[in-house]
Image: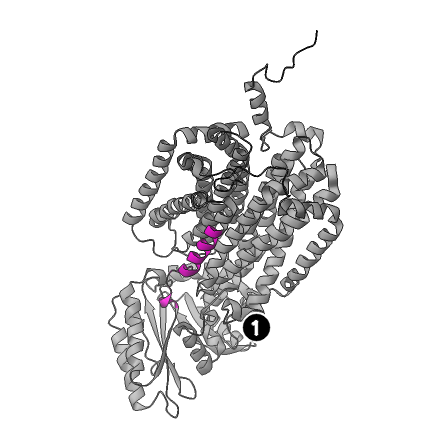
């Protein structure tokens, strides 16, 4: 592989005009496609194989035209102190608002709280429910504006009015200001690492082009492939991070080759052949981890994973072709490693760099460093034992939002469970007496604990299917509500003369969390297993890939522990803008396993391949570790800081889900790069010695030789060298 990439790098360097035009043309084509494509709208959220999804599908079949997936909105009113909502003036304001909302083009129905008994017992709180014929993400802006305007007009009468429901839901903003700050930090780190503005600009430019092509392509295909607006969020996040890192590794290796006296074309070829090989395999591990999300069998996650994986493939291709082309344009503006402006490169015999000094220290004290690293991460991982999973709702929104205030008003007036009603679907098609079956289900649910209200059964036109609404006594994300769902499914369903299914947002969230939990071990086995096999091919070792996988598990557990401490327990929550603690997003464990595993293997490949290269070329195991750190530690550290800055930018988002993902990925990169790869890995390699690179002979013969270390380039040099160059004169 090294020889092929060496030739590819030199070709891109010589044909830089063609390569640059090709990528610019692809960016333009993707941009035009995105601009002319129809709006994506909302991807259909479904969880195949769950009871909540089965009930939802049954509702669509038995209650046609009911817009089961339509958006809902709520206007929640609270009377001023000393007044009630039933007072004449307040009642007139609410009824006027009902009339105004009923004129909307996408409105199916608007409820009058005085006719539907939607007034609290003390008379201080009332609410209007609005049903729409389109999903939340597909509502017109004018429809959302009309809902908010109605609330504003009602406030003018002196009432407290807040707006809730998923009708206000829009595409989550990842935090534009934070992303700009993240990119600014990345730019500073690149300048410090690569020594010039031009060299630093190349990774930023290529990463932006790669993300532009990836995200634009996703946007262009969104309607055709049913991709939601959130699909591109992960692609943007991962594409920026790996795009910068992959380009950084190749540019850094290029500067190192220049420092050894090679001409620029040869240096480009060498950098692409060696660092480029590591980029290919690092990219493959990320693609495996992201594409593996399809194992979970949640269409939304599958699409997000595949879209992000495609963006990573683009980042790899750009690093292997466009970076060599741009280095050709840059010429002498990208200087050899160690060269200051106007001065020659520093000699290798100079003062050892920080990476060399750190690796030498670890080799002298490997057991102590290993123990400290494992115990430290293990301690941080302890909160994982208290992990509670759920999905965010309006109760997890910042208190500054009207959705959160509406949620709190409803809890105050009607109880916390009112924000998460359960819908019971009674399929009595095969029952002898459907009404009796539904009545039996209703009476049974009333006898369960944690139930506040059970509405009478509502049948469809055919009279074979009924819906019952149950209001729990506890909030939607509580363990008590989850126990109630299981009690209905286990106790009531087993006794009923009909199929009894539980659905609704709360039940859907419970099923989603359970499905993700059940899929975690198979997903982990698939991703780690495939990457383990890949790393055996790369490192030609059994113990090095095993150590890489175990180190990854340690860093992910520590990162999840930190997420629990901040978002569930509230530690340092004020510093990060976490206004409401609660269950951790159910996607978080499997999401972090997928993303962090791919990124962790990046650092493993880049750092350890340089050690392997030194070992293969004759250095002792300990010296190879020091050599690997000498050449790669600074670049890996810079790459990790850049990735942390990019992910950290998402912490500024107002959406708790995006904030949690940004923090989780940033802290996971910190633990994995600086504790696992920079401390635990060299300590383990120092303790193992030559055994670290052991591989059974039969397996060595069976594995393909991918030549990540560039051994083929050395043979290439010897073949092209002058046969008389090293010949000495003989004395006669």
Kindly give the residue lying farthest to the bottom in the view shown.
82
Visible residue check, residue 500: no
Residue 642 against residue 400 in the figure, above or below = above
Magenta-colored segment: predominant secondary structure: helix
Based on the displayed image, in which of its 4 quarters is residue 93 positioned?
Answer: bottom left
Q: Quadrant of the N terminus?
A: top right
Tell me the residue at 62%/42% (across/down): 630
Q: Quadrant of the C terminus?
A: top right
Q: Which residue is mark 1?
A: 480
Verify whether residue 168 appears in magenta: yes
Task: Point out residue 30 in the picture as x, y percentages from the top left corner.
Answer: 33, 43
Which residue range is magenta in the image? 166-188
Tell me the residue at 38%/65% (across/down): 169
Task: Point out residue 245 in the picture as x, y percentages from the top left corner.
Answer: 50, 45
- Taking the image as shown, residue 322 lies to the left or right of residue 700, namely left
Neighbor class of circle 1 (other Cα within 10 Å; few <14, some 14-19, many 20+) is: some
User: Is 498 or 25 nearer to us in this picture?
Assistant: 25
Task: Point out residue 15 in the picture as x, y percentages from the top left corner.
Answer: 39, 29
Based on the displayed image, in which of its 4 quarters is residue 141 positioned?
Answer: bottom left
């Amino acid at each position: 592989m090294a020889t092929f990439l060496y030739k590819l790098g030199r070709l891109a360097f010589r044909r830089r005009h063609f390569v640059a035009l090709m990528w610019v043309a692809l960016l333009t084509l993707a941009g035009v496609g995105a601009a002319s494509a129809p709006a994506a709208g909302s991807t259909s959220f479904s969880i195949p194989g769950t009871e909540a999804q089965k009930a939802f599908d049954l509702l669509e079949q038995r209650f046609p035209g009911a817009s089961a997936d339509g958006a809902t909105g709520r206007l929640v009113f609270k009377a001023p102190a000393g007044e009630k909502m039933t007072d004449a003036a307040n009642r007139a304001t609410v009824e006027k608002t009902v009339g105004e909302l009923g004129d909307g083009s996408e409105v199916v129905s608007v409820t009058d709280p005085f006719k539907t008994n939607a007034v609290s017992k003390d008379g201080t709180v009332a609410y209007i429910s609005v049903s729409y014929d389109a999903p939340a993400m597909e509502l017109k802006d004018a429809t959302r504006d009309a809902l908010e305007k109605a609330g504003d007009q009602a406030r003018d009468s002196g009432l407290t009015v807040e707006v809730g429901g998923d009708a206000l839901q829009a595409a989550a903003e990842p935090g534009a200001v934070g992303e700009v700050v993240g990119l600014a930090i990345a730019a500073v780190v690149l300048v410090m690492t690569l020594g010039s503005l031009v060299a630093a600009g190349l990774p930023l430019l290529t990463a932006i082009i790669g993300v532009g092509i990836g995200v634009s392509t996703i946007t262009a295909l969104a309607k055709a492939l049913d991709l939601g607006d959130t699909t591109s969020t992960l692609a943007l996040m991962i594409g920026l991070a790996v795009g910068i890192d992959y380009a950084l590794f190749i540019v850094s290796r290029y500067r190192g080759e220049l420092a050894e006296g090679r001409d620029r074309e040869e240096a480009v070829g060498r950098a692409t052949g060696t660092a480029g090989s590591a980029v290919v395999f690092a990219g493959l591990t990320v693609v495996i981890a992201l594409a593996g999300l399809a194992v979970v069998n949640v269409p939304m996650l599958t699409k997000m994973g595949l879209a992000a994986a495609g963006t990573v493939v683009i980042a790899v291709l750009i690093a292997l072709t466009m970076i060599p082309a741009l280095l050709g344009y840059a010429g002498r503006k990208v200087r050899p490693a160690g060269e200051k402006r106007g001065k020659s490169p520093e000699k290798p015999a100079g003062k050892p760099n920080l990476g060399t000094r750190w690796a030498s220290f670890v080799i002298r004290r490997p057991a102590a460093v290993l123990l400290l690293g494992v115990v430290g991460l293990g301690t941080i991982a302890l909160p994982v034992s208290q992990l509670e999973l759920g999905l965010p709702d309006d109760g997890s929104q910042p208190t500054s939002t009207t959705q959160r205030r509406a949620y709190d008003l409803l809890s105050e007036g009607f109880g916390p469970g009112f924000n998460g009603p359960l819908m019971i679907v009674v399929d009595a098609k095969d029952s002898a007496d459907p009404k009796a079956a539904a009545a039996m289900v209703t009476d049974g649910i009333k006898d369960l604990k944690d139930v506040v209200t059970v509405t009478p059964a509502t049948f469809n036109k055919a009279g074979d299917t009924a819906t019952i609404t149950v209001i729990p006594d506890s909030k939607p994300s509580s363990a008590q509500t989850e126990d109630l769902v299981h009690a209905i499914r286990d106790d009531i369903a087993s006794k009923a003369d009909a199929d009894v299914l539980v659905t609704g947002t709360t039940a859907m969230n419970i099923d989603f969390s359970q499905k993700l939990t059940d899929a975690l071990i198979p997903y982990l086995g698939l991703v780690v297993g495939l990457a383990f096999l890949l790393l055996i091919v790369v490192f030609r070792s059994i113990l090095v890939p095993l150590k890489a996988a175990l180190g990854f598990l340690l860093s992910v557990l520590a990162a999840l522990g930190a997420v629990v401490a901040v978002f569930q327990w509230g530690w340092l929550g004020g510093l990060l803008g976490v206004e409401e603690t609660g269950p951790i997003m159910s996607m978080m464990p499997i999401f972090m396993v997928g993303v962090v595993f791919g990124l962790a293997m990046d650092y493993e490949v880049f750092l350890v391949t340089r050690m392997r290269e030194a070992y293969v070329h004759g250095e002792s195991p300990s010296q190879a570790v020091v050599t690997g750190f000498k050449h790669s530690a600074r670049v890996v550290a810079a790459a990790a800081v850049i990735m942390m800055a990019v992910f950290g930018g998402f912490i500024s988002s107002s959406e708790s889900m995006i904030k949690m993902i940004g923090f989780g990925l940033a802290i996971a990169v910190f633990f994995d790069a600086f504790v696992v790869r920079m401390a635990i890995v060299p300590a383990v390699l120092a303790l193992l010695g030559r055994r670290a690179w052991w591989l059974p002979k039969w397996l060595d013969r069976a594995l393909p030789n991918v030549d990540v270390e560039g051994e083929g380039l050395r043979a290439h040099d010897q073949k092209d060298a002058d046969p008389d160059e090293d010949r000495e004169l003989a004395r006669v």
